[in-house]
Structures are given as C-alpha cells and as structure tokens.
C-alpha cells in the first residue's frame, strides 16, 4: 500500500514542495528506509517517528516502510519532515485511509509525539499557496508566522495524535486567525528615538540624508562621541516597511531560526551589527548548504560595522558586490543560491588606533606608521561606495547637561524622509529602483542635471580632490537627495556644495 502527503524543503530563502510517499510491505520487524537525498537529520527521523507513534497510542504494523521524498534530486535537510512521514506511515499501515492532497504538513516530532517548531515556515506557507494546497499543518508555535500568508488555512498542531485525528475527521481544529493588518500596525514601534541624542546636529542631518536617499555612510570620531548610538537610531527615521517588504525580510530571518516567537513577523527594519571578528561566510553567507549572511539578514534595513578598520580587509572587500548589486550569489558544487541584500551600510571608526588623533584636549599616542597602517585597512574602492563621510566630534558638556537642548523626535525626521522617498518613488515608478542611491549612470544623467554654477563647483572639486568617476556619480546622487528633501525640482548649487562636503573626509584621512 502506498500513501502520500505533501511537505516542503527549504532552498535558499524559498521553499520547494516535496511529496512524501510511503510504501509498506511485509517483514518480521518494523524497518524504515528513507530515500530521496536526505541528510542525517532526516535519516534519523525514523527513530523519532517510531517512538512518537508508540507514545501516541497509534498503530504501526510490522514490515518495511520505504519513505521516498520526491523530487529525489533535491537535498532534504532538517527535522521538519517528521510529522508528514509519521502520518503517511500510519496511513500505510492500513488502519484508516485518508485523502490529504489539499494539505501541506511540516513539523518536528519529539519522542513523546509532541510537535516542535521548525525553521522557514513563512517560506513553506508561500510555497503551499503557490502549489494550490489550501490547508497547512504547522507546529502550534509557528502558526502566527504561517498565518501571515493569506489564502491558506493554517492549523496549529500540538501533537501527532491530534494531527491524525483531525485528518480523519474525528476532531475539529479551528484554523488559526491572524489580523495581519492590525498585527502589522501594532508592532511598528522602536525602543529608541533620535531625541535621546544630545548635540551632533550635523551628524543627524547626514543620517537624515542617508535615510532619504538610501545612501551608505561612515562616521569618524574619537571613542564616546555617540557613533553607535546614532547608528542604532537610523532605522527609526527610515520609512516603514510595506507588507511585501516585511514578508521578504521575515523569510530570511525565518530560515535562520532568528525570529522571536512572540513577534513572528518583522514589522520594523532590521539592524544588524556583526562583530569585527566575523568571517567572510558569516558576513556574505555560505556553508555546505549555503545560508544567508549578515548582509542578507540586514535586507531592507541597516548593516552597522563598528570599528571598521578592525575588520579583516579581505572580509570588507566582499561587501563591494552586494553594495552595488543588492544581492549575493553563493555557488557550490550542488548549485547556486541567490540571497537578497539591499541594505544601508553604516560604518564607524576612530581616526587612529588610540582614537584621539586630531583631538584638541587629548594627545594621540600613535606613531605615524601606526596611523597609516590603521587607515589603509579600508580600501579606496570600498570608500568610493560610501556616499557620506561624516566627522563626529566630542559633545560639549553644556549640550549634554542641558534640559532644553533636546533634538527632534524620530517621527518628525521620518516625515521629511518619507516625503523625499515619495518623490523618488514617483521618479522611478517605471524602473526597478526606488531610491536615488540605486540610480544607474543613465538615470544620473537624466535626473541630476546641473546649472552652470553648480557644474563649476563640481568640476573644481573633481580636479582639486582627485575624485573617481564613481565618486562623481555618488556626489550627484547625494545632491539629488538633498534637493528632494528641500522639495526642489532642480539640483541647486548649495546641494552640490553640501554633497561635496560629505565626500571630502576620506581625502583628509586617506590621502
């Protein structure tokens, strides 16, 4: 007797439907053979399944059970196939046939029959909908995550016995209901705000420009000036994610198991701050079965690299591709996987190893050679991809202690950013990009035309500061964003001058 159920396997950030077939034939003792390119976790499921069936007081006859996971050339990983394998094996024992062609089933089994949560349920729910499955059986803890997808009934499963009785119509499990819109709107708040930062008004201005145009930014200053504090508040002034963006971002975090069970849906922009000891694979993604790295976990959000020169130079160089292409492709012998990686990069660094080079109050202890080696860890091509370079000086005591010197709230700044982004969305409605930072050369020529006065300022800067062609285009992109923030149709001379000022810092430090 052959029975079958449908499940799904993860491949990159997406899922692919898997047909779970079980063939039963006679033998003196129960033997389970799993085929279809399973990994160790899938092969071990036979022991979990047999124990769970016995603990659930369900019938499993003696004999050889051959479990085929089709398609056979797709690698199957993880314990999410436990539940569909167990249900198909029970049905193959001939106790009670059932028709579950409209179902997709995932879940890990404990030895006592309890169903445990698994990774990637959001991607699985999307695949179930695409494949025409109208019912989705998921572990109870994963139900809110799966219910985000409309068009599929999600049934939370606590244990194997409950799943079997429900499939046979012996009990009723109401589908999990999630008011997606209400959930989405109620979880958009941040725990930090820009009004908590005293002083640093020119840095806040630069962060506003970065958020408005999707530009990358680097802050340079001595320790304790608020670089990390400012970077952590950047997501609070970025436009709210759309539901589609939130689903795309949540998929990436779901397959890595990083979702908070209490908030099974990412409604605020991610902020990732990897340590400087991170490897190339940790930053970019990789592994035997490639998984997303920090650049993909920061998709639609912010990647913050603190103490930038402390990162290995080779590790930093792998960022050049994602910063230009907005995706990462990882190739292995078994194939290639592409992960999205459209993020804003914010970096912070000290001006020298001790941090006090140029400080008027404290003496720098570093030698000229140490300072040169420290700064050369950051390559010119990487700096060219960072649009805004900002100095972050020490904050005066009076600004820190004053009760009246409170800055703008994040909501106020966000409104200006949203207005500028709205102009860009309208400008690029016929193109794939939606921000000024993603403009191609043709779009730069079309939308960044200069007056003779502004063009003269830019020409002088190019000659005096030896900017590259890439830096030339990025100055124009930043100037376009500055004009959008002001609601100006054309780029003004002041916009060009401010954009050039944001590019001059690397020439002071790295010339």
Image: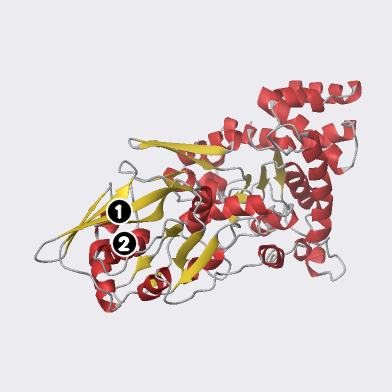
In the rendered image, residue 348, in percent from the top left (x then y), is placed at 62, 49
Q: Quadrant of residue 187?
A: bottom right
Name the residue nearer the viewer: 16 or 129.
Answer: 129
Q: Left or right: where does residue 308 sit relative to residue 333?
A: right
Q: Write the residue at 36% across / 72% down.
A: 160
Tag 1: Cα neighbours inside 10 Å, few (<14), some, or many (≥20)? many
Q: Is residue 291 above or below residue 27?
A: above
Is residue 274 in view from this perspective? no
Name the residue nearer the viewer: 345 or 221.
Answer: 345
Q: Which residue corresponds to mark 1?
A: 21
Q: Is residue 274 above or below residue 89?
A: above
Tag 2's secondary structure? helix
Tag 2: Cα neighbours inside 10 Å, few (<14), some, or many (≥20)? many
Q: Which residue corresponds to mark 2?
A: 88
Query: Residue extending furthest left?
Result: 28
Q: Left or right: where does residue 219 sit relative to residue 464?
A: left
The quarter of the rendered structure image containing the C terminus is top right
In the rendered image, residue 280, in percent from the top left (x then y), is placed at 44, 43
């Amino acid at each position: 007797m052959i029975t079958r159920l449908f499940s799904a396997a993860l491949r990159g950030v997406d899922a692919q439907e898997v047909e779970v077939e079980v063939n039963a034939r006679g033998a003196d003792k129960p033997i389970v053979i799993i085929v279809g390119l399973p990994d160790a976790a899938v092969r071990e499921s036979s022991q979990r399944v047999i124990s769970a069936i016995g603990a659930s007081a369900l019938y499993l006859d003696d004999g050889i059970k051959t479990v085929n996971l089709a398609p056979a050339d797709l690698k199957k990983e993880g314990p999410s196939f436990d539940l569909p394998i167990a249900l198909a094996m029970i049905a193959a024992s001939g106790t009670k046939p059932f028709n579950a062609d409209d179902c997709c089933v995932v879940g890990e089994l404990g030895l006592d029959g309890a169903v445990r949560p698994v990774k990637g349920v959001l991607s699985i729910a999307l695949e179930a909908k695409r494949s025409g499955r109208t019912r989705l059986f998921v572990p109870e803890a994963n139900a809110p995550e799966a219910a985000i997808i409309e068009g599929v009934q999600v049934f939370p499963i606590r244990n194997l016995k409950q799943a079997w009785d429900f499939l046979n119509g012996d009990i009723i499990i109401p589908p999990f209901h999630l008011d997606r819109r209400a959930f989405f709107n109620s979880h958009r708040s941040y725990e930090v705000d820009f009004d908590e930062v005293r002083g640093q008004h020119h840095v806040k201005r630069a962060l506003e420009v970065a958020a408005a145009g999707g530009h990358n930014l680097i802050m340079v200053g001595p320790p304790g000036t608020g670089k990390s504090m400012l970077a952590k508040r950047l997501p609070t002034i970025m436009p709210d994610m759309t539901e589609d963006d939130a689903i795309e971002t949540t998929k990436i975090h779901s397959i890595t198991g990083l979702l908070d069970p209490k908030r099974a849906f990412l409604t605020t922009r991610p902020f990732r701050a990897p340590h400087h000891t991170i490897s190339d694979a940790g930053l970019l993604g990789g592994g035997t079965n490639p998984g997303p790295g920090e650049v993909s976990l920061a998709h639609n959000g912010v990647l913050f690299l603190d103490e930038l020169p402390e990162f290995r130079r080779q590790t930093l160089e792998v960022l050049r591709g994602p910063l230009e292409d907005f995706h990462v492709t990882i190739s292995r012998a078994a194939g290639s996987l592409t992960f999205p990686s459209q993020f804003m990069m914010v970096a912070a660094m000290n001006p020298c190893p001790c941090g006090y080079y140029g400080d008027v109050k404290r003496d720098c202890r570093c030698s000229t050679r140490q300072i040169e080696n420290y700064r050369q860890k950051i390559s010119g091509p990487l700096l060219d991809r960072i649009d805004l370079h900002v100095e972050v000086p020490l904050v005066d005591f009076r600004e820190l202690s004053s009760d009246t010197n409170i800055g703008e709230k994040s909501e106020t700044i966000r409104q200006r950013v949203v207005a500028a982004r709205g102009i860009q969305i309208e400008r690029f409605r016929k193109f794939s990009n939606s921000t000024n930072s993603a403009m191609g050369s043709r779009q730069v020529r079309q939308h960044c035309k200069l007056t003779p006065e502004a063009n003269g300022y830019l020409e002088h800067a190019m000659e005096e500061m030896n900017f590259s062609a890439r830096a030339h285009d990025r100055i124009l992109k930043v100037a376009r964003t500055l004009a959008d923030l002001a609601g100006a149709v054309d780029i003004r001379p002041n916009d060009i001058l401010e954009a050039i000022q944001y590019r001059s810092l690397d020439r002071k430090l790295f010339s």
